[in-house]
Amino acid sequence: MSFTQSHLKVGELATGHELNVPIFKFTGTDANAPTVYIQANVHGAEVQGNAVIYQLMQLLEQSTILGDIVLVPLANPLGINQKSGEFTLGRFDPITGVNWNREYFNHQVDVQDWYVEHQHLDDAALISAYRSHLVAACQQRLDNPWGITSGHLLAVSLQKMAHEADVVLDLHTGPKSCKHLYCPTYAHDRAKLFSIPYTLMIPNEFGGAMDESIFCPWWQLSEFLRTQDRELPVAVDAFTLELGSQEHIDLHDAKNDALGIMAYFSAKGVIEEHVAPAQMQRFGCYLQDYKKYHAPLGGMVEYKAPLGELLVGGEPLANILRLDKYGTDQVLTSLSLPDDCVPILHFASASVYQGTELYKVMTNLFEL
Amino acid sequence: MSFTQSHLKVGELATGHELNVPIFKFTGTDANAPTVYIQANVHGAEVQGNAVIYQLMQLLEQSTILGDIVLVPLANPLGINQKSGEFTLGRFDPITGVNWNREYFNHQVDVQDWYVEHQHLDDAALISAYRSHLVAACQQRLDNPWGITSGHLLAVSLQKMAHEADVVLDLHTGPKSCKHLYCPTYAHDRAKLFSIPYTLMIPNEFGGAMDESIFCPWWQLSEFLRTQDRELPVAVDAFTLELGSQEHIDLHDAKNDALGIMAYFSAKGVIEEHVAPAQMQRFGCYLQDYKKYHAPLGGMVEYKAPLGELLVGGEPLANILRLDKYGTDQVLTSLSLPDDCVPILHFASASVYQGTELYKVMTNLFEL
Amino acid sequence: MSFTQSHLKVGELATGHELNVPIFKFTGTDANAPTVYIQANVHGAEVQGNAVIYQLMQLLEQSTILGDIVLVPLANPLGINQKSGEFTLGRFDPITGVNWNREYFNHQVDVQDWYVEHQHLDDAALISAYRSHLVAACQQRLDNPWGITSGHLLAVSLQKMAHEADVVLDLHTGPKSCKHLYCPTYAHDRAKLFSIPYTLMIPNEFGGAMDESIFCPWWQLSEFLRTQDRELPVAVDAFTLELGSQEHIDLHDAKNDALGIMAYFSAKGVIEEHVAPAQMQRFGCYLQDYKKYHAPLGGMVEYKAPLGELLVGGEPLANILRLDKYGTDQVLTSLSLPDDCVPILHFASASVYQGTELYKVMTNLFEL
Amino acid sequence: MSFTQSHLKVGELATGHELNVPIFKFTGTDANAPTVYIQANVHGAEVQGNAVIYQLMQLLEQSTILGDIVLVPLANPLGINQKSGEFTLGRFDPITGVNWNREYFNHQVDVQDWYVEHQHLDDAALISAYRSHLVAACQQRLDNPWGITSGHLLAVSLQKMAHEADVVLDLHTGPKSCKHLYCPTYAHDRAKLFSIPYTLMIPNEFGGAMDESIFCPWWQLSEFLRTQDRELPVAVDAFTLELGSQEHIDLHDAKNDALGIMAYFSAKGVIEEHVAPAQMQRFGCYLQDYKKYHAPLGGMVEYKAPLGELLVGGEPLANILRLDKYGTDQVLTSLSLPDDCVPILHFASASVYQGTELYKVMTNLFEL
């Protein structure tokens, strides 16, 4: 199968240069097959998603594609190109500090009101009308006569494209991280398709991220319809895939994640070929059991707990080295957690302020 | 009157150095007089509040002080000391991007529940019990066994002190700005005491700022008690004073603002002396009429509209210069707004991305 | 007269986007008239030069142009577009810290050697051959098989263009600054043509800046030829114009500076029209008498000495406010200098570390 | 043996907080034994030297110390505490961009002149007088009535201490790096004592770094004396140890490097115990054969060549991934070098601008 390339303007720099993102589209052969939107690198340092898109496109070129697939690598040119020292300062808008992945539009649809005018529609028409509503709301946001922030301009431009699809994959990474997946609880059975060992099960709450901006309005619709005694499964799938550590490109490993996405495509009917999911143990954890541990003191950090492995309660998580305290028992502080957990990610730097988010760990895991 | 000095630890750096803030306390002679908490420079570049505290302390040393007054200049040492290039990058946590003035604790008191156990108390005792509850909740937040972020550690440490006072003043500035005041609507008559020409009337909504973290729980209590047919005026005053532009110290002008604060103290009975408010026109504007205008294109900016003066609809707000378009009619774009307004502040830099917040303007002003 | 527009690629970002700069060229009618190269905004926050180029091009369109004039506004797209907080972090490469105006190529021509092969040439041919040598050396630098740094790539690409001209003007600004000119001592009489009151007379020493990269090799040639009893005036003029403060665009004031450049053009025969220099007092100062004063302590700064005016020895330069010292005589430190001077520029921010370059002042001034 | 602790003030922040560094001193038992100065973490992200000092102090506490040993971990508090995003922006002064390790004082002693007055001294007295001269020159620099920059204030304060010692070790790391040593050619035989496989042999040229600031004046003296037919070996040893990658603490590995330093101490007679150097192959390379390879294009980088291993000419160094070019042969560019080399370090981030320093490689290696 072949593809077409275009680009979308998402902003303008002080010099007048356009910020634009490349868009690749594979057109499917079956108008009824689910359509897909995939983006990568919204956080500037989280580059591995581009490598996964590279491998995925190579696989797709060899496949029979049923549903349209839109791929948007390098989705945040301002964030990707913003260095500060040797690293990419791409997590937030350098002017405002706002996290690029908290800028998506919160529809807050008045579903009850909307449904009054659309209840006569059959499911397919209802879905189509609702989708049109979401796309139009994004466009209206973009057209605000007072303008919108640079971050909203980027995010809502991407979101508008994503609303057109039935499946949305947002490719991220952690700082230093093992692979994990953000999955809405209604889609828990799809978590076993990707090549990702740890899954966070998240509720229907909008916090500003792409995946939430996509599934929340649909989930809300389904929940409302249930109160009207009408069953409509959530019409979209939206996931955030955390593909390891930032500031790292590994083409070989990217192939594994591309194959995991192909397995998902296969199960959903996006491609014709059968691709089996990887054989691996997979664990889930509810969002409320995903804990952040903050540095109780400032200092130099030796990270001890391996990522993606069980850490028994009381075993060493990290050491904080404080040379200014040499000669006292505070020169080296061994940190641990009281209960069993799986450390999923840790802070990127080897020195911390008091309060720096040091580790995020899953507790109360269950096998998927 | 004289004062005592102490300091509070609010964090720890990677080298182990303590982050601490200086605290000055004037002890009042009347235990029934209102007590005051004033802080400055929570945003690192907004330094003028320190000059105002300097002038205010000089005035207080010559005054008869009835209620305790706690003054905390240089309140955010990490933000103040964080340069990036020649300017102070002090608006947000350099690691997380979170605005230092959005980190205060949202109490979300279940007032109904709380009142069940406290309804037998008279007003004074009720106020005292509620205050204790707020202080204890801050302490509990600080004691979280998983730790808290550097930003919360700073903010909640300051907030806990502020909850002890009846009056809280948070001294800020805009980027390039005229003086203006954030005032909760219930306190609108106090807006005429300060030496500040423009006042934003804000509702009972928590957005993360210090002033809101202080007054919201009390406002909520008053509103709840009204449903119980018990009248209790909001027991605290909390304001954010925006004292002009950031990156600017002017001791002479600071004296004017110190005198405005003295006029407020005088009216509230914090000091014994009579200090009359400055004679000046003062205007108000409801928060929903305070508008942000974002740059519709990237480029170099010539700011045209003076701050703190009426701008008639259609008159030039700013020019955007685009040398890359020389020879076309896009080389110079004159921006204007359709309706009358008073520009209150504009962006600090002379070049913008598309979407940069260019101006904030008050519309639908009314005289106070 | 009309102009042509093109652009030059000077780099490539992580997303693959090209860094390119716009180039405008007015072609002169007299092949023997001096040719000109003007660039602006190599430091990202120093934007006013673009406004001057805008006004200058408007004047040139009404003029009879004899010598070719190349204008390069927005010359450093990476620096211009690099924000950090609300300001432009455009003084140095964000990765390496190297000042963008210290990256030009130091030819270090072995003039003696070069002259052996070219001594038979007449002056015009000698100049032409030397120019070719300089241009070729830049190209060779750009073609280094190990690559060159991003900063060199930009600087040497611009320098190569500039070597083709007889006159090079590099438009900068100070942080907070009055207008001043960097002028090589051999060109001292041309300093009276621009609309600039203060001139630094600089020697034949390469420190990495554009102007030096242009005039040093020619000055060196002239000095060598003098030892060979051959008189050849320095064949190029190169100046750095400091057009006031950074982060500021003022189109009206830009017109004044454009007219000053027109007066210079007129005197040099670049344009046919007669344009008289502005009537104003102008002062000079040798570079060794241009002094940097560093903050003797950290603190908040109230800048007291106006820029561009005589400051009598002992008069206040600035106050350092130290609220942590309130109650001691160290709360306010008044800084002054022992001898008379003219403060030319001061630091951009209102708070400093110990050692921050606070003011630059001219001493031992003389009237031009 | 036990030690004493003190600290040195090296600056002051905008809030007034002191910048100070901890100093640990072990006092030796033999006044004639060589004395040592060791510092770590002058570049803020290069933290592993602190871990090495930690292990070294633990070893020294068990040893018989002959010569005084001064240890200065956490030597640059401003650099260490300066985060920008999740990483430490500690390579250069955030205001000026100047590399913290290019700020040391260049003595440029007029040795000929100095020697006229000191030639009558015997070797020991001559060394003592020269040392006093160096220390006094640093003090004079610090006492400049116009002040000195924050960077000089730090660097020269440290340098002044270091001049008092016979041996100076400056503990750094690369970005992503294998271990290597900067060694002045006259000290080549000492390169075999440390636990470091690769050594750069550097000439007598001052580039601003600590090691050079220490050995250059002494080397210059020795070279001058040779012209006077007086043999005086260079009286000091000064090395920069590059202890792996930045943003990484590994206490176990730090022990190896501490033992390497102990082997050096043993050989020099700083400690009484015999400590044998580690058995390992060690290679040298002259500085002119240490090559920087710059990214020939912008893009995402997959680093392929392992550090510290021979890379045969033509073998892949790195891949540059350019998703914007998908569908062309420019989507993936494999970079290689024509000749054999050992890659020593590579850039820290996985995305680059055109011109970013991608790899540094040793060529023409020889076994030590």
Image: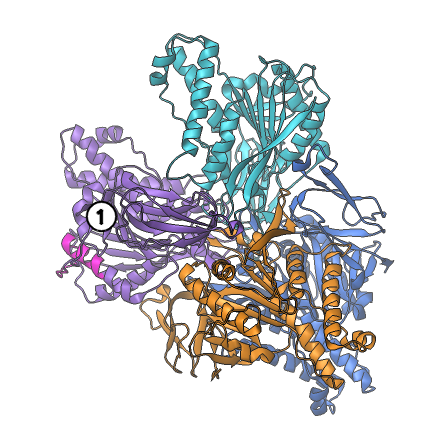
Chain colours: A cyan, B purple, C orange, D blue
Q: Is residue C15 visible?
A: yes
In the image, residue A169 sits, relative to residue C75, either above or below, namely: above
In the image, residue B207 sits, relative to residue C195, either above or below, namely: above
Q: Position of residue C356 (x, y in %)?
A: 49, 67
Q: Assign a secondary structure to mark 1.
A: loop
Question: Which residue appears farthest toward the right when viewing the image?
Answer: D367
Q: Position of residue B346 (x, y in %)?
A: 37, 51
Q: Residue at x 52, y 35 (%)?
A: A338
Exactly how many numbered labels are in the figure? 1
Q: Is residue A85 visible?
A: no
Q: Is residue B341 magenta?
A: no
In the image, residue A220 sits, relative to residue A347, either above or below, namely: above
Q: Is residue B268 magenta?
A: yes
Is B66 displayed left or right of C80 in the figure? left
In the image, residue B237 sits, relative to residue A265, either above or below, namely: below
Image: magenta residue range: B259-275
Q: Position of residue A342 (x, y in %)?
A: 58, 31
Snapshot quadrant of residue D4: bottom right
Snapshot quadrant of residue C126: bottom right
- Which chain is mark 1 on? B
Is B68 displayed left or right of C332 in the figure? left
Q: Which residue bears the numbered disc 1? A: B166
Task: Give whichever of C75, C341 is nearer the camera.
Answer: C75
Is A177 displayed left or right of B51 in the figure? right
